[in-house]
Amino acid sequence: MISCRNVARLLTSDELAAQSRWKRMEVRLHLAMCKFCSRLARQLELMRTAARRLPDSTKEDKDLEERLARRLSDRM
Amino acid sequence: MGFHDHRAEDLVQDVFLTFLERVDGFEGRSQLRTWMFGILHNKARERRRTSPGDERTDPIDAEFESRFDARGSWVNPPGDLDRLLLSKEAGAMIQECMEGLTANQREVFVLREVEGLETAEICKIVDVTVTNMGVLMHRARTRMRECLEAKGLSRR
């Protein structure tokens, strides 16, 4: 059985997606049973959602990207 | 990327000038976004004179470990942060807590959590291995969570 510590480490390091299918399943099963690890997972998700809403985030970058791409194609 | 407003403006200007200088040599091989962040990263590092590999130890590791017993079960489980993270002030608190990260941790945190870049893209920009990136992310998100939890407790 995977420990809470190892689940927490995989969640905070954002490395879950890179794990084997078996490992991901093991973590999912653990999260379904462990209140504190699932709380941590939820917190990290909420933190990401709030961080994405910060000013200067992706939306404005897309504008910048477009402006730069236009400038780039003008010069080529 | 780890700088305050006035220095950041300076840095962005520097990046933009470099971009214009080198734009003719741009072959379109990498995504424009990766390329621009790459320049920004290199400029930022020139000013900081540290590399992500410089951070071998961090006190946050001990703090993380102290939450578990020898078998790896929670002894000091995460506090409830739902109300705080769903509140209007969540963004401001996240920004405040980001001040407590090291420059390298902040860079990785911003690129992944704020800008939403993929791990492979970030490794290319910051020039770290996937393993190093995992360590930086773990420390950044753990420290952010600890900071938010402390703020949540002080609000009660």
Image: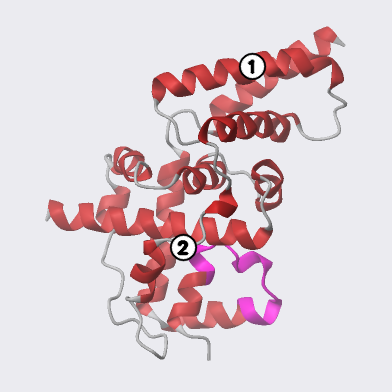
Categorize mark 1 by other alpha carbons within 10 Å: few (<14), some (14-19), many (20+).
Answer: some
Q: CA distance from mark 2 to mark 1?
A: 34 Å
Residue depicted at 42% across the width and 35% down the height: A54
- Residue B33, compared with residue A17, is above or below; it is above
Residue B72's quadrant in the figure?
Answer: bottom left
Q: Is residue A17 magenta?
A: yes
State the mark number for residue B57: 2
Q: Are marks 2 and 1 on the same chain?
A: yes
The percent position of residue A46, horizontal first and vertical second, equals: 40, 53
Pinpoint the chain carrying mark 2.
B
Depth check, mark 2 against mark 1: the one in front is 2
**Which callout, 2 or 1, points at the residue further toward the start of the chain?**
1
Left or right: B55 in relation to A50: right
State the mark number for residue B16: 1
| Extreme-left residue of the structure | B156
> Mark 2 belongs to which amino acid?
Thr
Residue depicted at 58% across the width and 46% down the height: B51
| Extreme-top residue of the structure | A74
Q: Is residue A13 magenta?
A: yes
Work out whether residue B156 or residue B144 is closer to the camera in this orientation and state it: B144
Residue A22's quadrant in the figure?
Answer: bottom right
> Mark 1 belongs to which amino acid?
Phe
Which residues lie in the magenta part? A10-24
Work out whether residue B147 or residue B60 is closer to the camera in this orientation and state it: B60
The percent position of residue A45, horizontal first and vertical second, equals: 45, 56
Pinpoint the chain carrying mark 1.
B
Residue depicted at 52% across the width and 56% down the height: B137
In what element is the residue under mark 2?
loop
Residue depicted at 83% across the width and 8% down the height: A75
Left or right: B49 in relation to B63: right
Categorize mark 2 by other alpha carbons within 10 Å: few (<14), some (14-19), many (20+).
Answer: few
Tell me the chief SS of the magenta region: helix
